[in-house]
Image: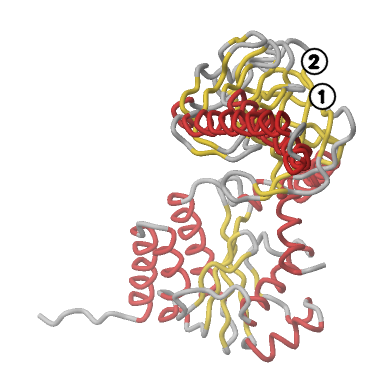
Amino acid sequence: MNAPQVGLAERVFAQFLALERQARAAQTVEQLAYHLVNDGQALFGYRHAALLIAGKVQALTGISVVEPNAPFVAFVEQACAQLQKQQALAKPQRVDFQTLGAQQQADWQALSVGEVFWLPLADRQGAPFGGLWLAREQPWNDAELALLVQLGDAYAHAWQALQPRKPWRLRWPRRRLLAIGAALLVLLLLPVRQSVLAPAEVVPLDGQVISAPLDGVIQQVLVKPNQTVKAGELLVRFDATTLQAQADVAERSLGVAEAELKANSQRAFSDAESGAKVDLLAARVEQKRAERDYARDLLARAEVRAPRDGIAVFADAERWTGKPVQTGERLMELADPRQAELRIDLAVANAIRLAPEAEVQLFLDSDPLNRHAARLARSAYEAQPVAGGQLAYRLDARFDTAPPRIGLRGTAKLYGERAPILLYVLRRPLAALRQTVGF
């Protein structure tokens, strides 16, 4: 038996069913988008097709990656935007060349072909969320349009199966977006207090610095850090071996000079030459006495005592033991534990305008849940290097209540003037941009 001949209608219907089956078999929206603009070209003979979702081109015939700024992409999006304003995208139709603007008509002639059909993709409620821009040279006949309309339903069903939610451009109408934008703008213009964070330390207020009274080697530090001391209590002892030897030599030199003066004074009554030396020897005695007194004074300085009551503020006793120091070098500080202030190192990048008596909140590293209120007392005009090599301004603040223990560290929050939230958020980026661009 001879097989029956397959007619044109049967072949077209078979191709139509294959297109539907391929659309429903797509695993991702990317695969489906590629199928929508390419696979129907053999059946309908269009030169190019563009898939638009929420007004943006998602796929093009023969193109793997859509370039958003390409001329054809811009033309299709602008043409569909004009049709949207005319409420002409909700139903399938031939696109009339005359309904577009002059610029779009010129782009149509340069980039597209004469016959264009718009095939909308609608959701279950009938609202379009996208569509296909199909262009070819020959006019579209009614049979092709009927197949396209039926195929559009299958395409929309397949797309919603893979992406059930509407694109955000469709979920948020223009009025709602404008209302949200206006609300955000108002919110960004609301004034708030500027604030910055900076490392801080509790330091003595009006403490007395104990410095090295002479050049020498520290033999022993007799107090511990933060130990309470009384006035006159021994703090530091220097190695006095050399000083004791110098004092002994000066004492003996003074004795020799006094003996020589006494001998010449006794001979002066009978010896004119001895009488002439008396004044010189008396001056030498005074010189030796001054040297002895200076040696004794240095020997007395070998023991450093507390000039007043307080606590000894320094880092480590072992750090000083056996170390040679020079006159005036800082050893420790005597402070009243009830009198302390806050020292803040404000980085140059975080500097904001701070008013006198600006509010300061201290959060200690050892107790981060509680805050200690303070007020800005002094601020430096010149930045200086701090630990880590960065530049910072030195700020001092006075506590409103009883201060924490001297030596504690933490983070200080400084409050400045009020400014819009927009400036508060963009202050650092704007500063960096200004430093980079220079305006």
* Type of amino acid under label 2: Asp
Residue type at mark 1: give it: Arg
Give the camera-side residue of 183 and 255: 255
Tag 1–tag 2 contact (CB < 8 Å): yes
Quarter of the figure with residue 435 = bottom right
Q: Give the structural element (helix, strand or loop) at label 2.
A: loop
Instruction: Say few, some or many: other residues with alpha carbon within 10 Å of mark 1 (under 14 / 14 to 19 / 20 or more).
Output: some
159 sits to left or right of 359? left
Residue 170 seen: yes
Question: Residue 227's quadrant in the figure?
Answer: top right
Residue corresponding to mark 1: 375
Residue 34 is situated, as x and y percent measured from the top left of the image, at 43, 70
Out of 397 and 364, give the one closest to the viewer: 397
Q: How crowded is mark 2: few (under 14 residues within 10 Å), some or many (20 or more)?
A: few
Assign a secondary structure to mark 1: strand
| 11 sits to left or right of 362 | left
Residue 200 appearing in the image: no
